[in-house]
């Protein structure tokens, strides 16, 4: 698998086990009355973009859409989870166990408000270093870190993906 600089490749990954994260009540976009509300993430979409070499090392951008069932968090009723510290902290703490493919992703945090969706929380991180990026790509191709997850690679030939 090759990641072409500034191109995007997408994947859908189902959780090995549900990732549980609790709303802490300090989001600028939701009520503090909802503090303690439990959520589960069972599926994520990954958006990968090779940033090329920056500061002397290779970087692979990893965008993450963490899907939450509407029955657990309905954005039309509750607003966005975006900016809630506790939810973000619990997502980071559980992401590598629920989604082993994310084990090399560092610095995971919310993306900007306009990227948040009606049924997902948008986050991003980076994989640093050519070896870690190659190991990540090899693991995806081989399926050796995916366990029982369903991994679906997007079919988007017009963007020049292999």
Image (cartoon, rainbow, N blue to C red):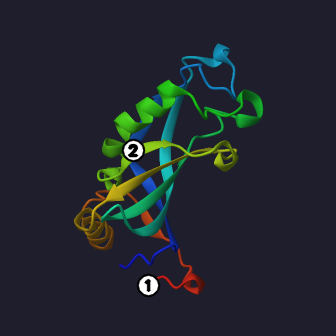
Q: Within 10 angstroms of label 2, few (less than 14), some, or many (20 or more) residues? A: few
Residue 126 is left or right of residue 72, and the answer is: left
Residue at image coords 57%, 82% = 159
Vertical arrangement, residue 37 with respect to residue 139, above or below = above
Q: Are marks 1 and 2 in contact (CB under 8 Å)?
A: no
Quadrant, the N terminus: bottom left
Residue 145, located in which quarter of the rendered image?
bottom left
Q: Nearer the viewer, mark 1 or mark 2?
A: 2
Measured from the top left, where is residue 149 in percent x and y? 37, 57
Vertical arrangement, residue 53 with respect to residue 159, above or below = above
Earlier residue among tags 1 and 2? 2
Measured from the top left, where is residue 77 in percent x and y? 76, 29
Residue 75, located in which quarter of the rendered image?
top right
Say what secondary structure mark 1 lies in.
loop
Instruction: State the CA–CA distance, disc 1 to disc 2.
Output: 28 Å
Residue at image coords 30%, 64% = 56
Vertical arrangement, residue 21 with respect to residue 102, above or below = above
Q: Which mark is residue 162?
A: 1
- The residue lying furthest to the right in this view is 76
Instruction: List the residue tagged with mark 2.
Output: 107
Residue at image coords 44%, 60% = 61
Measured from the top left, where is residue 155 in percent x and y? 54, 78
């Amino acid at each position: 698998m090759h990641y072409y600089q500034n191109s995007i490749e997408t994947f859908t990954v189902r959780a090995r086990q549900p990732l549980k994260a609790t709303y802490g009540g300090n989001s600028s976009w939701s009520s503090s009355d909802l503090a303690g509300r439990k959520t589960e993430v069972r599926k994520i979409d990954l958006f990968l973009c090779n940033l090329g070499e920056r500061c002397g090392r290779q970087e692979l951008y990893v965008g993450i859409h963490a899907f939450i069932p509407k029955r657990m968090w309905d954005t039309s009723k509750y607003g966005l989870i975006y900016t809630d510290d506790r939810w973000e902290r619990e997502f980071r703490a559980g992401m590598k166990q629920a989604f082993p493919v994310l084990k090399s992703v560092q610095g995971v945090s919310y993306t900007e408000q306009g990227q948040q969706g009606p049924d997902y929380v948008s986050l991003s991180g980076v994989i640093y270093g050519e070896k870690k990026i190659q190991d990540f790509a090899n693991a995806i191709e081989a399926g050796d870190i995916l366990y029982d997850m369903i991994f679906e690679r997007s079919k988007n030939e017009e963007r020049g993906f292999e």
